[in-house]
Image (spheres, coloured by chain):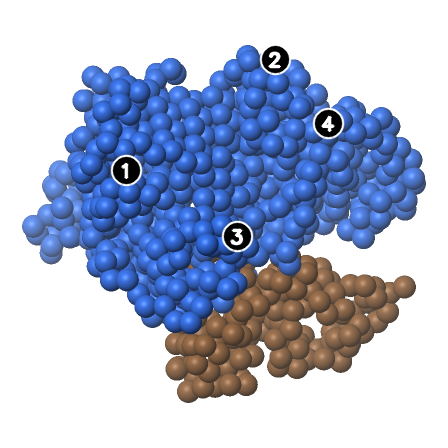
Amino acid sequence: MKQPIKLKVNGVVEEVLVEPWWSLAYVLREVLNLTGTKVSCDTGNCGACTVLVDGKAVKSCLLLAPKAKGKEIVTIEGLTGEDGGLHPLQEAFIEHFAVQCGFCTSGMILTAKALLDENPGATEEEVRASLSGNLCRCTGYVKIVEAVLAAEEKLN
Amino acid sequence: MTELSVVGKSVPRVDALIKVTGKAKYTYDAKVPGMLYAKVLRSPYPHAKIVSIDTSKAEQLPGVVCVATGKDAPEKRTGSATLDQPVLARDVVCAVGDPVAAVAAKSLDIAEEAIELIDVKYEELPAVLDPEDAVSTHPTAIVHPDLFNYEQGPFGHRRFDLDRPNVMMHYSIRQGDVEQGFKEADLVLENKFTTAMVQHCPLELSTTLATPEEDGSFTINASRSLHQPAKSVMRIVFGLEPSKLKFAMDYLGGGFGRGAVFEEPIAVLLAMKTGKPVKHVFTREEVFLRGGNRIPMIVYIKDGVKKDGTLIAREMTAILPSGPSEAFTGLVTRNCAFGAVGTYRLPNFKWDSYGVYINGPTTGGFRGLGSTQVEFAIEQHMDMLAEKLGIDPVKIRRKNILREGEANATGEITHSIGVEECLNKMAEFIKPEEKPEGEGVWRRGKGITVANKYTLAPAAGGGRVKVCADGSIALYHGAEEVGQGTDTVMAQIAAEEFGISVDRVKVQPKDTLNSPYAMGACSSQQTFIVGNGVKLACQDAKRNLFKRAAPRLGVSPDELETKEGEIYVKGMPDKKLRIPELFTGYAPGGYGSYTPDGEIIGNATYVQINTPDNLETGQIDPEAAAKGMRLNTSYAHSAKAVEVAVNTETGQVKVLRIGGADDMGQPINPKMCEQQQEGGIGMALGATLTEEFMLKEGIPLNPNFTDYRMASVNEIPTLDNIKVMSAPAPHKDGPYGAKGFAEGVMIGIDAAIANAVYNAVGVRIKDLPITPEKVLRALKEKN
């Protein structure tokens, strides 16, 4: 039986009807058409579905949608810099060639965003630790780590 | 060569902005009105007879629009070199994962429920699972009893062996006399090496959206590479005219060779039956079962060398198991031999490779197309020979590498070979002569290897450009953007030719109808082949442009050049006009503008022909070779070096430092080349240390990202300890001297790690992946 829940997604309050077994990722993609959030493994291993839930990085394939009731959610579509343009992380991912196929990119950027919000002085080791639950098959992670460190410098 | 202004520069990727904002559209994201969702019921057995299928309960489930089984599917099979894969199984299933029934429903939830309601009764048959058993003259089971009558597919290679009923391809090379070579050798050494089944693990799940159009044609979006071959296969299976079939190309969430399998017919079948668009998304498990994994190859190698390290004879036999669908295994069976001939001088060489069916998951195309596995054996053997002869591992390689102008073991004349420079760079980086100190239970060691990767031929690819009224360029090309950055490469080439910046080039959406032909992302050929096609197309457009401008400037067309949107007389930069001036009524706010004598366009196709190899000997005609005819388009070369720490108590291997030097000819975009190099390292670290798709009696054990472990950032050395370099040997026929190299980046890393483990603790692991269990077992056996 579908039940109505309210979520705040990228600053907009959304009321959606959800089945109890639907994941937040499913609702974002299939109900709200926010396809910037990807699902790749559906087992919480790859991190492609990472979104911000009340500012924390959460693998949205593992969170049942009803559990996200009343939460504030930011997806890649809602991420902006202070001026409303690109966020410094997005800029750094472009400048430092941290993007290849792009399928992990949303999850990588949002995971890094949560890290830098919480720990603005994160070291390379801390950046690596925070990204260790996000898989990328293209880059070997080198330029992703470089981009996050560059964005951090820009933000500080 | 004139100085380059855009090519050779690390301009930002043209697809980066759309990807960091989440707006890039992948087939996985597709949603169209009225779309149905497909699910497939698959075989739980490696080999079984289908006794009965009852779909009645599924058909009655509300929301189910169509249930299809083998009797509803076309009689024609799909395939590459041999048409061996039924769209849906008819009487027999030949692997776990073979499709048995398919459902199209109004929601994914309903489709999943419907699949559960289909009742299939099977009768198990003996399965052939061991490649050595399968290749034999009396195998446990014959995967395709009618194989010798199977229809030839549209591409790839096949060659049957009447005594070996599971062999779909046998390839051989004969050069000189290996027996004589072994007699003359001071040392003869032989070994067996094996590799694991590796999944591409593209993050985008395999997806097909098949849309029936009003005129009876079909549009297919598919998360794949090799759209043109896929179109050929679809035409054959459904008997469709070419004009009735269009593959649209979306962004692809990772390629790595996944395009060698043909899984789209199920969605097309359901779309035909229902008249509705049908979307079929694989689960991760289905990607493992049907994705065309890297072939777990068995390689036998026997070498004869002189005391000074000169290789005088090499004999190799490779066995390449494929699932019941050959999916490029035949092609890999032939082409993996080039990994053995592309680097070293082999005066006497004997090669036999066998592509063989087993009742296992599909294998076939994977980044490296077989060279990786073959060179895993060779590059360990070079170290084993060096040690026995008391020669330095770098010196033995340097002594035997082919030189420019020298014939390789197929008779092909070597050109553009930067391997020695790569090797020198890696030797400088890792300093193999300095043995690192261990600490406690950790021992340290170093390893170094060289590698080559052929780019196949024949191949073709084109470009088409349109000069727009504002002087910008609309670029049409068919090279597939699988994440490697090909759109940026093509835009840079067009920008270079027109003397404009990359942002003035707009790469147009791609499909198999409107885009110029390109074979697809395969064998690292797009930069070379399509790059040349785009370059020629630009030159064609410039000829047309100059023809229009010449009368106005009062000169002949060949006196003109273009730069920054202006056409000027060579040597007289002030005598010029702006491209918009060639257009009538150029007024952006009005009805638009046009050129009265037709659009200013250019188009071209670049064709790389090859000269055929003799079926018995693998040799090409020496006269053709002398004239510059080749077997392959080009060869990329590289060297890799690592330092590892090995825990003598747990067997754990940690990669402390790693480097790769690659010869990609002229880099078109150096930072994007680094992306490939670093990405190759990441993929190779997983494939070397942790990745193995495991089966027990044909039943998959780990078809998911929880139990199958690709490298995370944890497995990658820190930024200071990973180093990529280039050593370009420009290719005379490549665009600006460029050649493809993005598969070679991972070749040789596995053997370098194996060599480093040996260097650290004195045990040699000849079977991938190099797990702690294997290292520990070897250490115990040694002591």
User: Mark 3 or mark 4, which is nearer the start of the sequence?
Assistant: 4
The residue pinned by badge 2 equals: B149
Mark 1 or mark 2, which is nearer the start of the sequence? Answer: 2
Locate residue A17 relative to residue B555 in the image: left or right: right
Residue B710 percent location from the top left of the image: 54, 56
Residue at figure coordinates x 64%, y 56% from the top left: B707
Q: Secondary structure at mark 1?
A: loop
Residue B726 in percent (x, y) is at 26, 54
Q: Is residue B141 above or below residue B13?
A: above
Element type at mark 3: helix
Chain in blue on the image: B
> Which chain does the residue under circle 2 lie in?
B
Assess disc 3: are there few (<14), some (14-19) or many (≥20) residues with their C-alpha within 10 Å of its C-alpha. Answer: few
Query: In the rendered image, which quarter is residue B273 located in?
Result: top right
Q: CA distance from mark 4 to mark 3?
A: 32 Å
In this figure, which residue is indicated by the disc labeled 3? B777
Closer to the camera: disc 2 or disc 4? 4
Q: Chain of mark 4?
A: B
Q: Amino acid at mark 3?
A: Arg
Which residue lies at the image location 42% right of the left edge and 24% below the top edge? B352
Q: Chain of mark 3?
A: B
Q: Residues within 10 Å of mark 1 (few under 14, many from 20)?
A: many
Question: Which chain is the one coloured brown?
Answer: A
